[in-house]
Amino acid sequence: MRPVLLHLDEALDHQPLLRERRGAMVDARDLGPALRLWSRPKALSRLTERLRRDLPTSAEADLIFAGSGDFHHVSPLLISRAIEAAGGKPLTVLHFDNHPDWVKFSNGMHCGSWVATAARLPGVARVITIGVCSGDIDHPETKRADMSLIADRRVELYPYLAPDGGPVYRVGDQNWPSIAAMGEAAFTELLVSRIETDAVYVTVDKDVLRAEDAVTNWDQGRLSLDGLRTMIRAAAQRARIVGMDVVGDWSPPRYGPDLLSAALKRGEAFLDQPRRGPSPDLARQVNEAANLDLLDLFSEVAA
């Protein structure tokens, strides 16, 4: 397992213990403003080339820390690399997040749209989204959700809490139980049963975690770090983990690549993200502890 720091912002700059344990580093901060929140194809292509140049694929699984959750749409690029490194064999993507990230978005990718791209990658059998609490899943058809992902059985979504507080989340013709209703132990057994491939890719946005376990740019969920560890460990006993990425660190936003894009992104963030930012020192302390915990876990399960 190779720990990698993918620098797209300054979130990882002040996490010295994590930096000491990195196996590789890719500096793409020059691309960060163009990529943050959403990105056009040109910036995504430039990042793909940067990764190809500075981080050649290897036989061992990469654990990539990529900073803010505003960059979660780089995950399809990382998943593609993992599929290539694993010889193109089909895999299941386990997506831990407080948001479904399944909206429609044209001419690029958005941190809230990337699941559609990932689910349609050659080699991805299914995306299983775990832990959502946000209101994005309440009547998703009215919130630009790509409902074809559900109709085509490309995505399953297990919320931590259903929008109506009931035991089951109903969308389209699907009924998915909530983690809160089942209990984490029973849900973990269900999760393992839904993995039908021999390989798994894990992507974690730390906003899935309760506030005491992570500090992010977004509204946060209710899953505990212990619960997250238990689920990943159980998945690793069912299938081989071939790659991982972690986002959800806090950093002050810098938007680009041009004035118009920056203004549009700033307006969107004003509407969608918490208005008041956290203490930067607290954010670094809490997030580094969570990152180190996940690094220890992945070192164990993907060794």
Image: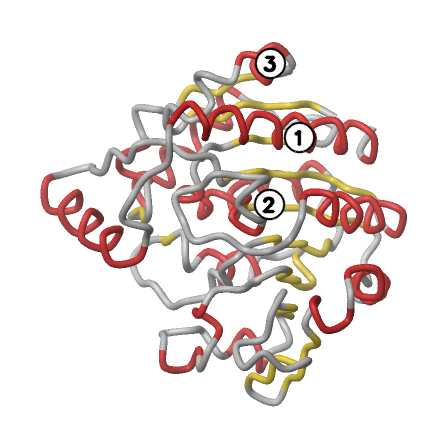
Question: Foreground residue, 139 or 128?
Answer: 139
Badge 2 element: strand
Quadrant of the snapshot with the N terminus: top right
Q: Can you say whether 122 is above or below 303 in the image?
A: below
**Residue type at mark 1?**
Asp
Q: Can you say whether 254 is above or below 28 in the image?
A: below
x and y percentages locating residue 119 in the rendered image? 57, 62
Identified at 81% across, 51% down, the residue is 235
Identified at 40% across, 33% down, the residue is 47
Instruction: Classify mark 1: residues with Cα within 10 Å, few (<14), some (14-19) or many (20+).
Output: many
Residue 283 as seen in the image, left or right of residue 167: left
Instruction: Classify mark 2: residues with Cα within 10 Å, few (<14), some (14-19) or many (20+).
Output: many
Quadrant of the snapshot with the C terminus: top right
**Residue type at mark 3?**
Leu
x and y percentages locating residue 274 in the rendered image? 33, 50
Q: Which residue is mark 2?
A: 204
Cα–Cα gap, marks 3 and 2: 20 Å
Q: Which residue is mark 3?
A: 17
Q: Which residue is mark 1?
A: 62
- Whether residues under marks 1 and 2 lie with C-beta atoms below 8 angstroms apart, the answer is no
Q: Can you say whether 200 is above or below 22 in the image?
A: below
Badge 1 element: strand
